Amino acid sequence: MRSTDTINRSRSYEAFPFCSPCRVRYRMSRLIRLLRSFSRTCQQLSGVTAALMFVAATRLAPFAGGGSAAALIQILFAARFSRSPSKRRPRCEIGRHSVSSYQPWNGIDARRPHYSTFAAMLALVSLLPGCATAPLVQGGGLSSYDGLKPSDGKVTKSRLHVKKEQLAAAKTINIAPTAFPPSVAPTLSNEQRVLVANAVNRALCVSLSDRFKVVTPDVPADLTVRAAVTHATETDEVAAGISAATSIGASFVDTSVPIPVPRIPIGLGDLSIEAEAVDRSGRQQAAMVWGRGATAFFSTPRASKASDVYDLAGAFGDDFANLLNKGQSPFEGVGIDIPSWDKIGSKMGLAPKYAACENYGRAPGIAGLVGGKLGLPPEWTDDGPKVARSP
């Protein structure tokens, strides 16, 4: 049997911390040393980009918890860690390995102008929301609101009900034009409202093609889908334009790791829509009141008042189509839905599966992706419904 001294000096136990407090310091010391190399790349970012990255750290800090949140903020501060011996004080020995009490915040001089700016920014951005809150607004357009039950997703609020057996027996479906009254969003132009309503119909038509045969509205079908926008908040064009320009500028920064730049969480748009599916006799077989707001991390900033509601319109079309295709809430379960080849092709601007979807025009495809990266308004890349383009 080996003595305690032999075990303490053996190779397998040389770097393993036995003492619980030392174990925490040891692991935090290793984590900070690994993050120091990444912090150097952050120092290359411009002032505006660093500010937006700091917004991201502030929003992620409550979800990271403990030392991870401090580490995130420390990275985005890009502080220079001091290596002077006075900043490291040995606390305990683990075999022959010395664990230091590392003080990463000692490298920050609060009297420097840029650090005081960051400190002031921390107080400001902590008050900003990371996403827009969309209310669930009933417009009175559904044939019935009875039986609607809450079914929320991670970023979506909804109330819905569905009759799965009746939907399973349906084979054909048509889509009535989506209503977008001027009184709902008076600041949007008529062109923008038409574009948003058409985005709803296009997304519904493409997604419903996976399960149903889609026919034109003038052809009788087993189910008819009716939708109406009940609430819409415009996007702040200035904040979205600055976010897009900052994202483009960050792409030219030479870093070994791609750094996502969140948009400024000011003036985010939101959208609320209600829709139902009725059978040939007009009886409601499914209904949904849906609401979602844009987020600072996952919404594409574009210099247009209708940019967020345009993107959210497509998201609603996918959610309501999934409700009809599966006969259950699209927010239940944790499975990953793999899109069909027809749906992928339609999203890329190719011909849709059914000719009825041609009435809503084709998706912008590559032009839309490039335009989104450049922050161009959706009015510039989406031609809108086919009827509107015909002479």
Image (cartoon, helix red, strand yellow):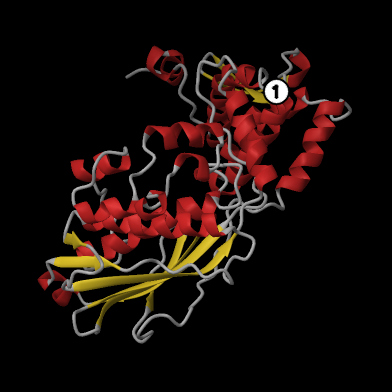
Residue 294: % across, % down: 54, 53
Q: Is residue 282 positioned above or below 267 on the image?
A: below
Direction from residue 289 to residue 338 in the image, left or right:
left
- Name the residue type under label 1: Ser
Direction from residue 184 to residue 176 in the image, left or right:
left
Q: Is residue 199 positioned above or below 279 on the image?
A: above
The local crowd at label 1, few if under 14, some if 14 to 19, many if 20 or more residues have their Cα within 10 Å, is few
Residue 64: % across, % down: 54, 43
Direction from residue 285 to residue 33 in the image, left or right:
right
Which residue is more in the foreground, 363 or 285? 363
Which residue is more in the foreground, 139 or 146? 139
Q: Quadrant of the N terminus?
A: top left
Residue matched to label 1: 46
Q: Is residue 112 positioned above or below 73 on the image?
A: above
Is disc 1 placed on a helix, strand or loop? loop
| Res. 129 image quadrant | bottom right
Name the residue located 46 percent from the left edge and 18 percent from the top edge: 8
| Res. 342 image quadrant | top left
Residue 196: % across, % down: 47, 56
| Res. 170 image quadrant | bottom left
Name the residue located 42 percent from the left edge and 33 percent from the top edge: 367
Residue at the far front: name it. 391
Which residue is more in the foreground, 301 or 43? 301
Looking at the image, can residue 90 be seen?
yes
